[in-house]
Image (cartoon, rainbow, N blue to C red):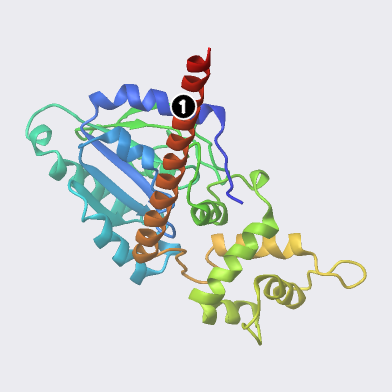
Amino acid sequence: MAIQWFPGHMHKARKEIAEAMPTVDLVIEVLDARIPFSSENPLVKQLRGDRPCIKLLNKSDLADPAITEQWISHLEQEQGVKAMAVTTLQPAQIKRIIPELCRKLVPHRADTEKDIRTMIMGIPNVGKSTIINTLAGRVIAKTGNEPAVTKSQQRINLRNGIVLNDTPGILWPKVDNVASSYRLAITGAIKDTAMEYEDVAMFAVGYLRDAYPAELQLRYKLKDLDLEELPLLEAIGINRGARRPGGYIDLHKVSELLLHEYRSGKIGLLTLETPAMAIAEQAEVERMLAEKEALRQEQLEAEKRKRSGVRHND
């Protein structure tokens, strides 16, 4: 089942972003380096049009560095896009490189005395507010471990020829790719109260078993990885003493443990999707949507013929 979470303020934010976009020279989109495809909001591309865009792969200190390089090459295939891996653990890099990129991508403004007007966007809990505070050199945007901390837009003059429009972290009303909804939940972009821990943890442990078996085995001292998701979670629970009275495994406790340890990097530097996976999944989503649209059109035509037949009989 796909996980959906779209609070009311996000709908308002989408409208405000659309209204402000005509005044913007450049868009900065903050992605999660562990899930660049799933954290790339399709609304951003739709709203920014042909404006240049910097895609920041934040939390790169938690992601697989080899796959992050693949993602940078993949994202930069799009016209006008520059991608780079960042981590808020290296604020000097963020303060130096991002302004340089802004000037390079908007040379017609950089060569004048006019400020480069940028809009920074990203899904909840991707680290956008921390990046803003780093660029500003002071605490301006609220930060927190819970998604959707920022709930309104604000304009920030960096006093270096660049003005930032901060926006609330927005998801989109419906995540069509089921795998993406799970990845968003695993990384913390969706509030824990909007998901079932056990369901999300089984998706996570299945992926880690297949993609990062050595890291999973080492962290949880597992003897056998040739298990389905539920027995594998139970094995982790046994190892970590997550038992209830009567010897039953506390699946909620072990699921919570697995997700929190993934988010903190304790299992290793692990990325949940590759460009090749994203291309295949996007193609499948587009096929499914095309089928749904064709079915909808058939139903409309059938209803039209039915109404026409009723009028004819009358």
* Vertical position of residue 158 compared to residue 187: above or below: above
> Which residue is drawn at the image coordinates 75% and 59% (left, top)?
252
Q: In x, y percent, where is residue 27? A: 27, 38
Is there any visible trace of residue 87 in the rendered image? no
Q: In x, y percent, where is residue 120? A: 34, 37
Is there any visible trace of residue 92 in the rendered image? yes
Q: Quadrant of residue 33?
A: bottom left
- Element carrying mark 1: helix
* Vertical position of residue 123 compared to residue 260: above or below: above
Pick whichever, 1 or 274, lies toward us. Answer: 1
Pick whichever, 307 or 266, lies toward us. Answer: 307
Q: Identity of the amino acid at label 1? A: Arg
> Which residue is drawn at the image coordinates 27% and 60% (left, top)?
74
Q: Quadrant of residue 297?
A: top left
**In the orientation shown, which residue stands out farthest toward the right?**
246
> Which residue is drawn at the image coordinates 59% and 63% (left, top)?
203
**In the orientation shown, which residue stands out farthest toward the bottom?**
223
Dot 1 surroundings within 10 Å: few (below 14), some, or many (20 or more)? few
**In the orientation shown, which residue stands out farthest toward the top?**
314
How many marks the image carries: the answer is: 1
Q: Is residue 132 left or right of residue 62?
A: left
Q: In x, y percent, where is residue 256? A: 68, 59
Q: Which residue is mark 1?
A: 305
Q: Is residue 111 left or right of residue 254?
A: left
> Which residue is drawn at the image coordinates 22% and 55% (left, top)?
76
